[in-house]
Image: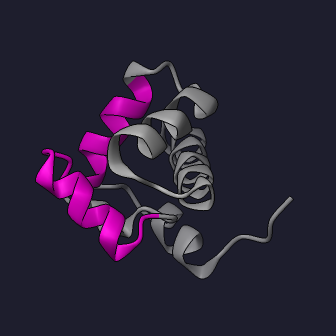
Amino acid sequence: MEPVSPRLRAFLSEPMGEKDVCWVDGISRELAVNLVTKGFSKAYVLLGQFLLMHKDEEEFQKWLICCFGASECEARRSATCLKEWCTCFL
């Protein structure tokens, strides 16, 4: 298991609110631009997609890679971040 990154710890430290998508752990600047361009400007919008996929991390990762050009590492870290946020706040 990977150690918790400072960025993940910060994201999990409080409710999501109106945070931009770039706050999600694993979302690089380039990936954030791709997401915003297609309407995923807020972290809660990305979370909504994760929930629509029934919190299926593998499906979510494939979606990020195929639709937005995420690397495997970015996709994995983003899915983990949203899963952990759900565990803490839902």
Q: Judge whether 34 appears above or below 10 on screen.
A: above
The secondary structure making up most of the magenta span is helix
In terms of image quadrants, where is residue 15? bottom left
Q: Is residue 54 left or right of residue 4?
A: left
In terms of image quadrants, where is residue 37? bottom left
Q: Position of residue 63 (x, y in %)?
A: 44, 34
Q: Residue at x 46, y 66 (%)?
A: 11
Q: Position of residue 88 (x, y in %)?
A: 57, 46
Reply yes or no: does residue 37 show up in magenta.
yes
Q: Residue at x 24, y 57 (%)?
A: 34
Q: Nearer the viewer, residue 14 or 73?
A: 73
Q: Nearer the viewer, residue 11 or 22?
A: 22
Q: Position of residue 13 (x, y in %)?
A: 50, 67
Q: Judge whether 27 appears above or below 15 on screen.
A: below
Assign the N terminus to one quadrant of the image: bottom right
Q: Position of residue 54 (x, y in %)?
A: 50, 19
Q: Nearer the viewer, residue 70 or 24?
A: 70
Q: Judge whether 43 appears above or below 29 on screen.
A: above
Reply yes or no: does residue 34 show up in magenta.
yes
Q: Colour scheme used in the picture?
A: one colour
Q: Is residue 67 visible?
A: yes
The magenta segment is 27-51
Total numbered badges shown on the rendered structure? 0
Q: Is residue 19 visible?
A: no
Q: Residue at x 34, y 63 (%)?
A: 31
Q: Is residue 42 left or right of residue 66?
A: left
